[in-house]
Image: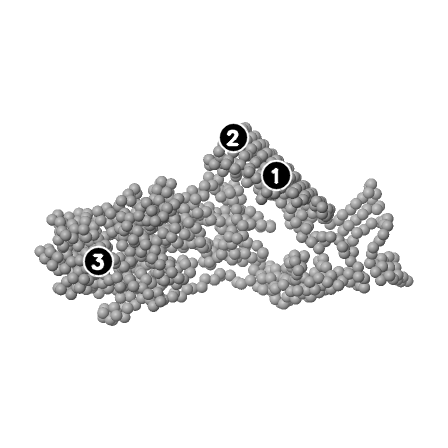
Amino acid sequence: MALFTSAALGAGLFSLGSGFLATVSAIALNAAVGIGLQMAVSALQKKPGEPEPLGVRGKMQSGGDVARSIIMGRRATAGSLVYANTWGQAGKTPNAYFTQVIALSDMPVSALTAMWVNGEPVTIDTADTTLANERGYPVVEYRADEGDWLWVKFYDGTQIVADPFLVGSVGSEDRPYEATRVGRGVAYAIVTARSNGELFSGFPSFRFEVQGMPLYDITKDSTAGGVGTQRWNDPATWGGDGDHLPVVQVYNILRGITYNGDWIYGLQNTPAARFPAADWIAQINKCRLPVQGADGMEPQYTTGAEIALATEIATSIEALLRGCHGRPIETGGIYKVRVGEPGAAVFAFTDDDILSTEPQTGKPILGLADSVNGVTASYPEPEESWNTKAAPPLYSPDFEERDGNRRLISNLDLSTVSVARQVQQIMKAALDEARRERRHTLVLPPSFWTVEPGDVGAWSSLRNGYAAKLFRVDGVADRTNLDVMVDVTEVDPADYNFDFFTDYTAPDFTVIVPDRPPPQPMYGWTAVPAVIYDASGNARRPSIKVGCDPEQDDVRNVWVQVRLKLSGAVVFDSDSTAYASPYEWILNGVFLPSTIYQVRGKFVPYSRRRMEWSDWIDVATGDIKLSPGLDFDPYAGAVGLDSLGDDLKEYQDWLGSGRREILERLEQINLLVADQDLGNALERQQLREQVTATRDGITAEYLRQVDILVTADTALASRIEALNASFGNYQASVSSQLVALASADSALTLSVNQLSSQVNDPATGLPATASGLSALQTQVTTINGQVTANANAVSELNATVGNFSASGRFRTTVEATPAGAVGRIGLSVSATAGGSTSTAAMYLDALAGGLSRVVFEASQFIVVAAGNLNNPFVVDGTAVRMNVANIGTVTAGLIQGGPGGKLAINVTAGTIVVNS
């Protein structure tokens, strides 16, 4: 004898419909419809210790047998680890970065809204786009020592290509990350941490707050009785505030969760006709009803859950409906739900309507074992990292007195509810309804044939003392003679009255703070004007003296920065000042006389402790010229010297970035070509040749590929040729690429040639490499009606063996616009040994109608004429030197000569002094 007509959902979930035969007794119906209670009320009778399958997953899972899961509504998860690897080098630290790929949901989600690291809530700096396409966005709380140490990147599950950072930078030969690992339909996070003993005591742990999968909301579908553009057969239209409503979530489970047409979870192929639209719309709007909350008005009922696909459908629906006083109903294959307080009576009956010839049962009072007069509840609290929190307990002295002054407590597990107000509202209603003790099973005549489970009736009974008392129908059995047996339970809408201002108790939240020591401030910081003297005791240059507290442990150096107060430009920056007696230092920098600077300092520890900068201190340098009493400055009137430090850094950055800019542009073009494989091109042709020879581990290869394509806004032609050869540890490669690209506002040509040779040094095991790059680029663009033409040439050579490396760079850039033209040439050579680098460079600048400049950067600059080594022109860090000078006019402050400076001509003062 079938008690339930929907066995696929699990016995005990849905209220009884007309699934009984005439032989079903009143006792059997009464026993069977115990499941007809509200889910929150039935949870009070749940056996202690039963696991909650939809609780927050607080620990990351790993391994090959992790169950797939989906997220509905707002939920936190630790996810499951799908890939991890160490990679890269920072300074002298190998494998300095640790990257984890963490799957969050096996269906696309709407957003990542919060993150916790080692239990601490953190802030993701989405405004910092420096590495947004590489490691991700930096985490503010893990920003120290003027740098970032933790980054996160998020994919919502709609991605169509693998992450290039994982494929290109993180993947290694031992642990490759293939370009085929797209993760279609999977929402995941990439978290990269840089090794830091102070910030990370071990591998960091993470928890992510996710706004779950977009769901179909029938109230937003104008073709199904709602208002809006959502359509069941077009998932691209789904999503909105309904994603967080429990009835919307249950509706989607019963209709069936699919991805690209493949079934994922829930029922399968359930037609919409089995879900009366008006009924479901009314219950969804009941969840959406605005009510007073701790932060203003909010929806009455919202839920969220991470559902493992192995979870029984009935279990998931029960947990979701528990968060809204919900109760599912199935009648003749038609699915409905009832949420919250009972509705108005839809039928009425009296004692005269009840068939006295049929047996009746009644239960006016619950037994002590079934009574509840107090409720505790637990729920996941977002304010406490989504850890399980106990809500303020709810006691009723009146109920306790009726139960013989006993306190009968039951716990309510609200694992899908994360709003404290909603938890307390459910607790109050569940307790009040649990005290509704009157329950009857009786038989009504055929005129009540239309009565269904979930309906509310008004019963007037002299025998029981009922005056239009409301009863909810929890079970119905249709008899062959058309009589109707019903099981009813008393209800009262007042049980669901919740006044936020009188019934709500604000929870006490545990403040979550990072478990690491605070950064140490700079103590005793001072900065005053100072003077640098020559060997004869003459004041030569203005300077600044700094000092700090002498009694600090674990301090190796002092980091000092000086900036111009007017512009904020940093003119001195050194972290190599040794922390030693007398704990004050005169800075060996170039400072202008009579100028206001600002100075700050920070301790540099032996360990990885965090340190804080001092405040900026104003210092005005003295009016110190070349010699005492001389009002003369040899650099007066020289244009651009004040910004020479900034200009030199800009020259170096420009020259060093040439290779990177060319290769990044080339990568963008290659990605454009690759994207057209997805069918975006209006016209595409490809020519490809490849020849490979391999024997006994020796390989030689030739490749040529030509791509011609036209899209709606671009015409592109690209040719790639590559030669590769390998013999044991020796590898050699040559590649070239030519590109011509035209669009509506730009024309670009690019020619790049790269050479590389490599072998692992048998003596050290370290790689020895030699590489070269030569590139030409031309481009004409039109932006806002202005035409710009520019061309770029880059040539670079690099060689590395062990800790020794050398490089040579040459770059030319020219640009012309209707407003002017500029040209620049730079060349440099550098050699590095064990982290120490020496560099020599030359930069040429020309600006149309403006200043032209040649800047040399070297430890020593020498000019030799016609091989005459007796009279070189030498510039070093201390002076300009020459043996013979033929000068027409000399402008000077002081001219000195003779042993010990016996002759001194003070040009400024007009005096000549001869010392015997």
84 displayed left or right of 640: left
Query: Is 482 placed above or below 532 here?
Result: above
In the picture of the structure, the residue carrying the numbered disc 1 is 779
Residue 763: % across, % down: 62, 42
Assign the C terminus to one quadrant of the image. bottom right
In the picture of the structure, the residue carrying the numbered disc 2 is 686
> Can you tell which of label 1 and label 2 is closer to the viewer?
1
Pointer 3 local density, CA inside 10 Å: few below 14, some 14–19, many at least 20: some
Alpha carbons under labels 2 and 3: distance apart: 73 Å
What residue is shown at x 72% (from left), y 53% (from top)? Answer: 641
> Can you tell which of label 2 and label 3 is closer to the viewer?
3
Pointer 2 local density, CA inside 10 Å: few below 14, some 14–19, many at least 20: few
Pointer 1 local density, CA inside 10 Å: few below 14, some 14–19, many at least 20: some
In the picture of the structure, the residue carrying the numbered disc 3 is 345
| Front residue (pair 85, 430) | 430
Of all residues, the one furthest to the front in this rendering is 785
